[in-house]
Image (cartoon, coloured by chain):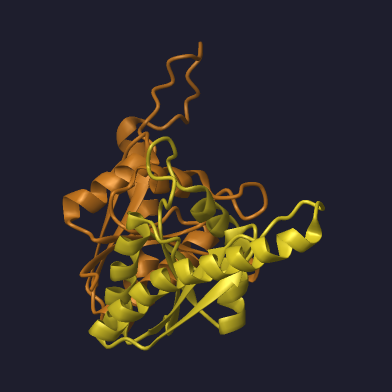
Chain colours: A yellow, B orange
Amino acid sequence: MFKHILVPTDGSPLSEAAISHAVEFAKSIGARITGVHVIPAFHTFDYRAEMLEDTRQQFEKDSRAHAQRFLAKIEQAAQEAGVECSTLLATHDHPYEAIIETARETGCDAIVMASHGRKGIKALLMGSETQKVLTHSTIPVLVYR
Amino acid sequence: MYRKILIPTDGSALSTAAAHAGVELARQCDAEVVGVHVAPPYQYPVNVEIIVPEYPSEEEYQAAMLRHGEEYLHRIREEADELGVRFSGRTVFADGTAQAIIHCAEETGCDLIFLGSHGRSGLGQLILGSVTNKILSSCRIPVLVYRAEKSADRH
C-alpha cells in the first residue's frame, strides 16, 4: 500500500527517533524513503547589499553543511537497514509547505514525522509544523511520539 | 513492524474509507486489526417534565447502539476476511470518545492507531476532526491519519 515514504527531519532528537521508526516501518513493508530537511530562506535587509552577499553565501553554506549532517543520519539508518533512500534539502520559510510539495514532487504516498520537533514537548500538544502538515497534506501522515 | 492496529469507526463514509485503507496496511504489515466503535452512554431523560412514551429504556438503547456498532464493525470485518487479516471488534460505551479509543488501544496492546482525519463531522468545517485531534494530542503510540478524498463520501 505504501511504497514511498517521506521522512522530514529538523535534526531534533525527537525527529531522530522518528527516523528510526520510519526506516523500520519502510523495511517491514518493502518501501523506500526520501528524507528531507527544510532550511529557512535567508532574509536580508536592504542595507549595504555588497556586504550582505558574503553573509548570504556564508549562511547558505553553513545551513547546507548543517542540514547535510541531519540528512546523513537518515541515509546511514536506511543503509544499515537495507532500505532504499534518497535525501534532499529544501529552502522555504514554511517547512510544512516544502514538506508537502516535496511529497508531491517525489511521488510519496505517506509521510512519517515526529509529533514535535526542535521546540520540544514543553507547551504544545503537538508541534506546529506537524500540525500544519496534517492540516494540508492530502496523503496519510503517521505521527510518531 | 506493527503487529496490532486499532481502527476506530463512527460509521461515517470517511471513517469507513479510512478503515478500508487500515485493513490494507494491516495486510501489508502482516498485522491483526482491532476495530472499535464508541457509542455515547445512555442519557436518562432527567430534564424533561414529560417523558415521551417512545423514549428508549436503557436496555433498548444499548441494544440499538450495539447493533449499529456491529454494523459498522462488520464492514471492516468483511474486508479483513477478504484479505486474510485477523480481526476482532467491539463496541464500547463512553463519554470521551478519544479517551475510550486510546484506552482500547492500550488494553488490547495495539501498536498503531489508524484513523481518518475526519469522521461524522465531514471534511468541510474542521481542519481536523475533533476526535482525531484529541487522540493526536494525548496518544502515546503512533497515529496514522488517513485522508480520504472528498469523492469517497458516498452517502
Which corner quadrant holds the C terminus of chain B? bottom right
Q: Can residue B119 be spotted in the picture?
A: no
Which corner quadrant holds the N terminus of chain B? bottom left
x and y percentages locating residue B40 in the rendered image: 39, 37
x and y percentages locating residue B115 in the rendered image: 42, 59
Residues B47 and A134: in front is: A134
Residue shown at the point (45%, 50%) measured from the top left: B132
Residues A2 and A39: in front is: A39
Q: Can residue B86 be spotted in the picture?
A: yes
x and y percentages locating residue A37 in the rendered image: 50, 68
x and y percentages locating residue A112 in the rendered image: 41, 67
Residue shown at the point (45%, 60%) measured from the top left: A10
Residue shown at the point (64%, 68%) measured from the top left: A57
| Picture quadrant where residue A122 is located | top left
The reply, left or right, for residue B39 in relation to residue A102 is left
Residues A42 and A114: in front is: A42
Q: Measured along the vertical axis of the image, is residue A86 above or below residue A51?
A: below
